[in-house]
Image (tube, grey):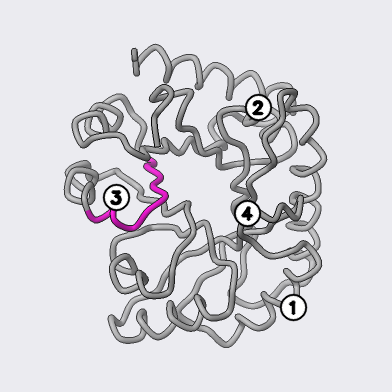
Amino acid sequence: MDLQKNFEQVLENINNAARRAGRKPEDITLIGVTKTVNEDVVRDALELGIKNIGENRVQEIQKKYDTIREDDDSVLHLIGHLQTNKVKYIVEKVDLIHSLDRLSLAKELQKRCKKEDTSINALIQVNIAEEESKFGLKEGEVITFIESLLEYDRINIKGLMTIAPYAEDPEDVRGVFKQLRELSQEVEKKDYKGVEMKYLSMGMTNDYEIAIEEGANMVRIGTALFGERIY
């Protein structure tokens, strides 16, 4: 695994996709997904310039947290499903949660943040394709969900996230990304107080170029950077 070579290739692909869409490459945030990757490789990634680190599991965040924070410029993302009983372990550690998808989780985040006198930034996870195997709200539930969150003053909604179905041809999931972008625009027009549609987190190793063409400004890349992993 040549991390530097992989990183350069991913950056080139991001640049090309952004330019095809008439966008600035520097507006796209690359999140390196370090699931199952050890601390030494995380340190190498940070040194190369992969400052945004994404983890799927709370236990992995706890394990790698000190290593990640050795770099003052590091930004830590929780991109996987978050159980309510794990909230207490991450509210003061994580910079952005990508997977807010239910009211019970919002209530726990609010309660824990109040206790710690802090706040948390979060993206709402939307299951655009309505896959049974994936978490997230249905598209038609998002507006009502956001309105139910307006009273939670410790949660800062910063945008939306989705995971597209796997497709051999990523063109097949272009519509998923387009739908999330359009939903984001719909939410933005509502001009809810304390709600921003700053981030569209969509696109992974198989489809991130298509996602960028459709408006993603955060892409979550694991395999293309760190190679195939056994889970």
Q: Secondary structure at mark 4?
A: loop
Q: Is residue 38 within the magenta segment?
A: no
200 versus 213 height, above or below:
below
Say which amino acid is labelled 4.
Lys
Q: What segment is highlighted magenta in the picture?
A: 52-62
Crowdedness near tag 3: few (<14), some (14–19) or many (≥20) residues, C-alpha within 10 Å: some
First in residue order: circle 4 vs circle 3: 3
Which comes sooner in the sequence, label 4 or label 1?
4
- From mark 4 to mark 1, how far is it between C-alphas? 20 Å
Separation of residues labelled 1 and 3 (CA atoms) = 33 Å
Within 10 angstroms of label 2, few (less than 14), some, or many (20 or more) residues? Answer: many
Q: Which residue is mark 1?
A: 144
Tell whether 231 sits left or right of 144: left
Amino acid bearing label 3: Glu
- Please name whichever residue, 44 or 132, is drawn nearer the observer in this view of the structure: 132
Q: Which residue is mark 3?
A: 60
| Residue 117, quarter of the rendered image | bottom left
Q: Which mark is residue 209?
A: 2
Q: Quadrant of residue 208?
A: top right
Give the image location of residue 11, x and y in percent.
50, 21
**Would you name the residue on which mark 4 appears?**
134
Secondary structure at badge 3 equals helix
Q: Amino acid at mark 1?
A: Thr
